[in-house]
Image: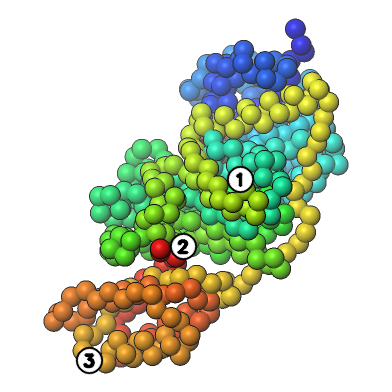
């Protein structure tokens, strides 16, 4: 019998329990694939007396990180605690002691991943993070290995399950944002404090990780343009549907050669686009490579077993190399490209405004668009006689700074009561 790979697990919550269950239930097939048994040696938790979702020997549990970090038998640390500190400190210590690391913590990787990867390279050990983006979808390895022959020009992802669930409920049932959020919380998708999900930060953490792999460039998460879904209303979703679009929270990355653009915001996408069919808590990542063409990865982006599946796959990769000789992947970044300012980013826009219904109004608004070189693709007017009426526009592709110039002028027109919403559109309708 081959010598076991001893594992120290940091955290036994949702993901930690999924990891334990997979290691217990798939023990035989994992041994075949890894070449060595994967054995849990210690598990760090905060509360030794908490009821756990899986059955583990109480002797394994500890509240002292030193019980894992000081144990020379532990070769791999799996971090599924969450948050930046103390997780960063524990992982840095593990890497310094030449222990391999597997983590699901996107916030930590987005904020502190590069120093940790550099430390792992210096120590000659693995630092793997498949589970950090899109849960069970194997997107990290796909970008790092399977698509390594390509120049990736763009990626677009629905990479936050909570917001996708909320937008799906709003579109299907006409629920308000608040009602849909309460439902997401009741079903256990959204946290009690849902801001990281609904304000777009969770998706931004995942986007910078994807961009580092796809474009080979580091972008600090504070530089990513982030807009959450709180401003999306059932009214906008209904107009979008009438125009042939659905509204999704997209994480978008584009490599423009000299620069890159990274952004997270609500977006109208054509009903025919493959991402439009991604509903409920599902995730998907759409990628365009110059050799492979268009690809879409789809699956469960969260949950104990889907996320555990990705964590255990990383563990198997480590075990294989321990058994058969290591090939250590280094940090994927090899260049430093500037981030394109949001004003220079071009896209189409959906605009909804309330205006007076009288002759000449449309001409004045169209004039403001024209002066700023914003060209219009469609216009809808709703209502007649009752003031104000609603005007909905979809523009052709235009730089954000031009659109902002037009809107500044339109906002000042006495015939315009309010610009009620502005949402970016991705993907020209056929
Ligand atoms: P969770 O359910 O809140 O579990 C966290 C675990 O870590 C708990 O067992 C907790 O101990 C332990 N812990 C936290 N801080 C600790 C500390 N300072 N010292 C000792 N133990 C500590 O979290 P989760 O949902 O499993 O998420 C874990 C990580 O995976 C996060 O980085 C998250 O972003 C990522 N992730 C989660 C999902 C998902 O579907 N949940 C999907 C992809 C990635 P106690 O149990 O004793 O409190
Ligand atoms: N909170 C995340 C989501 C799951 O809603 O997709 C963990 O990545």
- Provide the residue designation for mark 2: 427
**Residue behind label 1 places its C-beta within 8 angstroms of ligand 1:** yes
Residue 316, image x, y percentages: 68, 25
Q: Nearer the viewer, mark 1 or mark 2?
A: 2
Assess whether mark 3 and mark 2 are in contact (beta carbons under 8 angstroms): no
Q: Is mark 2 on a helix, strand or loop?
A: loop
Q: Can residue 241 be seen in this view?
A: yes
| Ligand 1's quadrant | top right
Mark 2 vs 3, N-terminal side? 3
Q: Please say if 182 is above or below 125.
A: below
Residue at image x 32%, y 44%? 183
User: Which labelled disc corresponds to residue 106?
Assistant: 1
Q: Residues within 10 Å of mark 3 (few under 14, many from 20)?
A: few
Mark 1 vs 2, N-terminal side? 1
User: Which labelled disc corresponds to residue 136?
Assistant: none
Q: How crowded is mark 2: few (under 14 residues within 10 Å), some or many (20 or more)?
A: some
Q: Nearer the viewer, mark 2 or mark 3?
A: 2
Report the quarter where the N terminus lies.
Answer: top right
């Amino acid at each position: 019998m081959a010598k076991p790979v001893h594992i120290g697990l940091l955290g036994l919550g949702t993901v930690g329990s999924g990891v334990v269950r997979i290691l217990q239930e798939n023990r035989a097939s994992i041994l075949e694939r890894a070449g060595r048994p994967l054995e849990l040696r210690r598990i760090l938790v905060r509360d030794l007396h908490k009821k756990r979702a899986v059955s583990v020997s109480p002797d394994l549990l500890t509240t002292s990180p030193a019980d894992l970090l000081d144990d020379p038998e532990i070769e791999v640390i799996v971090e599924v605690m969450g948050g930046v500190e103390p997780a960063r400190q524990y992982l840095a210590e593990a890497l310094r002691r030449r222990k391999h690391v597997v983590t699901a913590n996107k916030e930590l990787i987005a904020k502190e991943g590069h120093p940790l990867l550099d430390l792992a390279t210096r120590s000659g050990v693995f630092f793997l993070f498949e589970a950090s983006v899109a849960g069970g979808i194997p997107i990290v390895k796909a970008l790092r290995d399977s698509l390594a022959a390509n120049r990736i020009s763009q990626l677009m992802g629905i990479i936050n399950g909570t917001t996708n669930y909320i937008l799906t409920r709003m579109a299907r049932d006409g629920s308000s944002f608040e009602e849909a959020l309460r439902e997401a919380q009741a079903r256990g998708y959204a946290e009690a404090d849902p801001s990281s999900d609904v304000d777009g930060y969770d998706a931004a953490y995942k986007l910078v990780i994807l961009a580092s792999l796809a474009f080979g460039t580091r972008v600090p998460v504070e530089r990513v343009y982030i807009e959450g879904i709180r401003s999306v209303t059932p009214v906008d979703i209904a107009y979008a549907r009438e125009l042939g679009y659905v509204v999704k929270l997209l994480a978008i990355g584009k490599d423009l050669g000299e620069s890159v653009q990274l952004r997270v915001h609500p977006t109208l996408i054509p009903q025919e686009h493959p991402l439009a069919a991604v509903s409920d808590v599902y995730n998907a990542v759409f990628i365009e490579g110059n050799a492979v063409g268009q690809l879409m990865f789809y699956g469960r982006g969260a949950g104990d077993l889907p996320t555990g599946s990705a964590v255990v796959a990383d563990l198997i990769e480590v075990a294989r190399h321990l058994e058969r000789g290591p090939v250590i992947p280094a940090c994927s970044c090899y260049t430093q490209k500037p981030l394109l300012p949001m004003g220079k980013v071009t896209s189409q826009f959906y605009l909804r405004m309330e205006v007076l219904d009288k002759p000449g109004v449309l001409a004045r608004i169209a004039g403001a668009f024209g002066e700023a070189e914003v060209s219009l693709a469609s216009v809808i007017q709703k209502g007649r006689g009752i003031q104000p009426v609603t005007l909905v526009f979809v523009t052709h592709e235009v730089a954000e700074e031009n659109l902002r110039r037009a809107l500044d002028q339109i906002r000042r027109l006495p015939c315009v009561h309010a610009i009620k919403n502005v949402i970016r559109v991705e993907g020209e309708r056929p």
